[in-house]
Amino acid sequence: MDWLDEVKWDRDGLVPAIAQEAGSGDVLMVAWMNRESLALTLERGEAVYWSRSRQRLWHKGEESGHVQQVHEIRLDCDADVVLLKVTQRGHEPGIACHTGRHSCFYRRLEDGAWSAVDPVLKDPERIYK
């Protein structure tokens, strides 16, 4: 797996991964990957991340059903950030955020305060039982 050796992993063996919706170009989320999760993502064709809080592999959608189908994997010019071009599955429109929103980037800075500007598409209480 020489291609994995080209990634510049941080001191914890991780690299940030951006999930971008293939169709719209929306940035859905940022997560972390280790060698195993990146290799599994390629193998499965679905996003697998490393959960720093749980200290384990995390197959996106394992609890929510909101799986990310991966179409393309890119590496930035410094080889220290991965970009996944995905289709968000499991709900229409796609829900990537644990808050029930399309994207994790739903807050915008307005007049010195963060405002939620994107709607909740599904109540998280109904997603995570």
Image: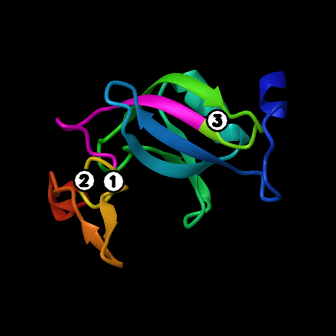
Q: Is residue 72 above or below residue 118?
A: above
The spot of residue 13 in percent (x, y) is: 78, 51
State the CA–CA distance, disc 3 to disc 1.
Answer: 20 Å
Q: Which mark is residue 109?
A: none
The spot of residue 78 in percent (x, y) is: 77, 39
Task: Identify which residue is drawn at 41% across, 42% down.
Answer: 27
Q: Are marks 1 and 2 in contact (CB under 8 Å)?
A: yes
Q: Is residue 58 above or below residue 120?
A: above
Task: Identify which residue is drawn at 84% across, 32% down.
Answer: 5
The N terminus appears in which quarter of the rendering? top right
Q: Are marks 3 and 1 in contact (CB under 8 Å)?
A: no
The residue pinned by badge 1 equals: 97
SS class, disc 2: loop
Q: Amino acid at mark 3?
A: Leu
Residue 106 position by quadrant: bottom left
The residue pinned by badge 3 equals: 38
Q: Is residue 34 above or below residue 104?
A: above
The C terminus appears in which quarter of the rendering? bottom left
Q: Amino acid at mark 2?
A: Arg
Q: Is residue 15 left or right of residue 122?
A: right
Task: Identify which residue is drawn at 35% across, 79% down.
Answer: 112
Report if residue 1 is visible in the image: no
Task: Identify which residue is drawn at 50% across, 50% down.
Answer: 30
Residue 124 position by quadrant: bottom left
The residue pinned by badge 2 equals: 101
Residues in magenta?
83-96
User: Would you call the spot at circle 2 few (<14 residues within 10 Å), some (14-19), or many (20 or more)?
Assistant: many
Is residue 93 covered in magenta? yes
> Which of the two discs, 3 and 1, labels the residue nearer the N terminus?
3
Q: Is residue 96 left or right of residue 86?
A: left
Q: Between 112 and 85, which is closer to the camera in this rendering?
A: 112
